[in-house]
Amino acid sequence: METLIIRGYPGVGKSYVGKKYDYIIDLELSDYKWIYDDKSINMNKELRKTTPYKQLNPEYPNNYINKIKSLIGSVKVILIAPDEDIRIELDKNNIEYTICIPDKTCKEEY
């Protein structure tokens, strides 16, 4: 199975389509980038992204790249965040991706 990897900016609908279609994985970056303390571990994912109760995961970005590699070939679409560290690692690992950028006309929506 060929896998399409899409680096999508906030608000382009990654979470929406990830929940709607079972062949799409929305690979939440914060689950790999941060280690959460007891105050935030059980928070809603969207709320947890903004919590100060976290520290950088020392395994990041390799843990995220390894997860992407493990999904290639087993799902049709992987949605990822437009994080620069991840872009660098994708390029180093020769992993192809497409970028989804909001149109300028959507500025007010964002």
Image (cartoon, helix red, strand yellow):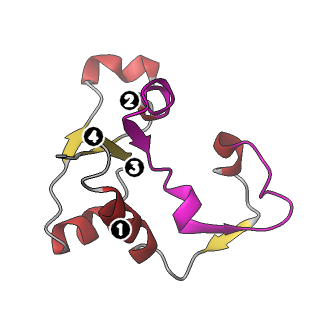
Q: Amino acid at mark 4?
A: Lys
Type of the residue with mark 1: Ile
Helix, strand or loop under label 2: loop
Separation of disc 3 and disc 1 at Cα? 12 Å
Q: Which residue bears the numbered disc 1?
A: 65
Number of other residues with Cα within 10 Å of mark 2, as a class: few under 14, some 14 to 19, many 20 or more? some
Q: Which is nearer the N-term, disc 3 or disc 1?
A: 1
Proximity of marks 2 and 4: CB atoms separated by less than 8 Å: no
Q: Residue at position x 37%, y 22% from top?
A: 107
Distance (Cα) linking label 2 and label 1? 22 Å
Residue 17 counted in the magenta span: yes
The residue mark sitting in front, 2 or 1, is 1
Return the x and y of residue 49 as percentages of the image width and height.
63, 50
Q: Which quadrant is home to the C terminus?
A: top left
Q: Which residue bears the numbered disc 3?
A: 81
- Residue 18's place in the image compared with 84, above or below, is above
* Magenta-drawn segment: 15-44
Q: Quadrant of residue 58?
A: bottom right
Q: Nearer the viewer, mark 2 or mark 4?
A: 4
Residue 76: which numbered mark, if any? 4
- Residue at 28% in and 17% down: 105
Q: Which residue is mark 2?
A: 12
Q: Earlier in the sequence, mark 2 or mark 4?
A: 2
Is residue 11 in view?
yes
- Classed neighbour count for the residue bearing mark 4: other residues with Cα under 10 Å, few (<14), some (14–19), many (≥20): some
**Which amino acid does the dot numbered 3 rest on?**
Ala
The numbered mark, 3 or 4, whose residue comes first in the sequence reads: 4
